[in-house]
Image: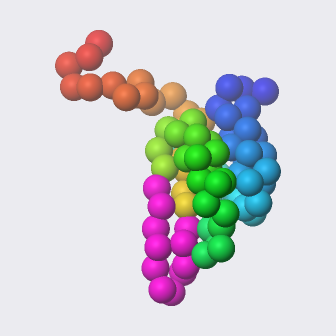
Amino acid sequence: MPPSEARIVDICTRLTAVGLRPERTDDGDGARIEALVPADFPMGSWPELLAVLETADRFGFADSTSRGRQLGAVVRTAPGPARHASPGTP
């Protein structure tokens, strides 16, 4: 299993373990994992949720009246620039 695929599976597994229902969408460069976060999500589960999200290449969180609270995480599956690279870094 490629390392990126293992990370995707790990993120989905850990999101499920904290009670969320992750949905995965693949495109040519990566996988996007999204899940709705219910309003009654346990306060004690937030540290684990944030620990899961920080393993992704990018992540975000949105709260809207029309779509509810939703998180998204992206894991690159195609080669790209180094993670956390700064300008001028070889």
Q: Observer-nearest residue: 52 or 76?
A: 52
- In this view, which residue lies farthest toward the bottom? 66
Residue 19, relative to residue 90: is it above or below? below
Does residue 25 show up magenta in the picture?
no
- In this view, which residue lies farthest toward the front? 44
Magenta stretch bounds:
60-70
How many marks can you see? 0
At x 73% / y 61%, what residue is drawn?
20
Q: Observer-nearest residue: 6 or 70?
A: 70
Q: Is residue 87 left or right of residue 26?
A: left
Magenta: predominant secondary structure element? strand
Q: Quadrant of the C terminus?
A: top left
Image location of residue 28, percent across then percent down: 57, 46
Q: Where, by quadrant of the figure, is residue 72 drawn? A: bottom right
Q: Quadrant of the N terminus?
A: top right
Q: Is residue 9 left or right of residue 38?
A: right
Q: Is residue 56 left or right of residue 62?
A: right
Residue 72, relative to residue 6: is it above or below? below
Does residue 66 show up magenta in the picture?
yes
At x 51% / y 86%, what residue is drawn?
66
Image location of residue 86, percent across then percent down: 26, 26
At x 55% / y 78%, what residue is drawn?
68
Image location of residue 6, percent across then percent down: 73, 32
Q: Is residue 35 visible to the viewer in this orientation of the structure?
A: no
Q: Where, by quadrant of the figure, is residue 76 drawn? A: top right
At x 48% / y 86%, what residue is drawn?
65
Q: Where, by quadrant of the figure, is residue 23 drawn? A: bottom right
Q: Is residue 15 visible to the viewer in this orientation of the structure?
A: yes
- In this view, which residue lies farthest toward the top? 90
